[in-house]
Image: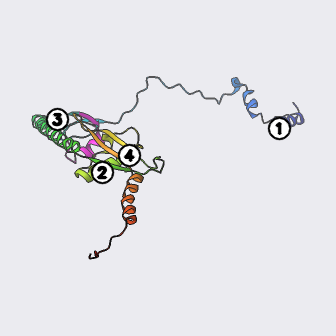
Amino acid sequence: MTDAKLQVERCRWSDLGSRKKIAESIDTDSADSIILLPRPEKDAQILLMPSTEIILTDNVPGLGAEADIVKVRRGYARNYLLPLGKAHEVTRASLRQLENLKKKRAEREARELNEAEELARRINKLRVIFKLETGETGKAFGSITAQDIVTRLKNEIGDEIDRHKIHLEHPIKTTGEHEVAIKLHHDVTVNFKFEVKSAHEEQAKAVEPAESAESAPKRGLFRRRK
């Protein structure tokens, strides 16, 4: 191919923007610079972070309780559990302490159960009224949420309950009697009963006696003698 024809051919391919076709037209048999990489093996080992076994000396949510032997990451044990005294390394000496840890666990669980039962009794005695913002037609502008219940219970009994223990699927937007389950302990669930009233109606009732008192005739302070 002459130089002129070669120049025309290059322009034609450039105008069509078909560099891909040029690459595909290369004779791979004569291209000795192509390197084929081996496929990765299916059974290649995955590097895992080093772990270690420890004995818990305290209740750690999501991990275990006293006397449990669990396997955790070494960094988690070294930087958190061991320095805070929440665990011991598994040794002969620490294994001899298992009975004491089991006793400590039983005492803690019994104490938590008694506290939950006492809290349930106090909640059962409550007679609570929530005010719900509504319009004149009764349509609710607000709602009673799980956080509202937490705040009200803290004001009434002085104890703050975890919001996630209150089983409220949807915020309450209706007046009347309501009942919400509160799981205080895995063996103790209390049904919190309360009433929701319209704040608009309560305000209207408070205004009516005042208006009737103003419209009543005023009597004189002195009576006329006969």
Crowding at dot 3, Cα within 10 Å, few <14 / some 14-19 / many 20+, comes out as many
Assign a secondary structure to mark 4.
Answer: loop
Assign a secondary structure to mark 1.
Answer: helix
Instruction: Check the image and report above or below for 46 versus 128.
Output: above
CA–CA distance between discs 3 and 1? 77 Å
CA–CA distance between discs 1 and 2? 76 Å
Assign a secondary structure to mark 3.
Answer: loop
Give the residue at mark 3.
Answer: 67
Give the residue at mark 1.
Answer: 15
* Location of residue 145 in the rendering, given as x and y in whole percent from the top left corner: 38, 46
Please indicate whether residue 14 sits to the left or right of residue 96 in the image: right
Assign a secondary structure to mark 2.
Answer: helix
The answer to whether the residue labelled 2 contacts the one labelled 3, judged by CB atoms less than 8 Å apart, is no
On the rendered image, what quadrant is the C terminus found in?
bottom left
- Dot placed on the residue nearer the N-terminal end, 4 or 1: 1
Q: Which mark is residue 142?
A: none
Give the residue at mark 2.
Answer: 152
Crowding at dot 1, Cα within 10 Å, few <14 / some 14-19 / many 20+, comes out as few
- Please state the extent of the stretch shown in magenta in the rendering: 70-87
CA–CA distance between discs 4 and 1? 66 Å
Residue 201 forms part of the magenta stretch: no
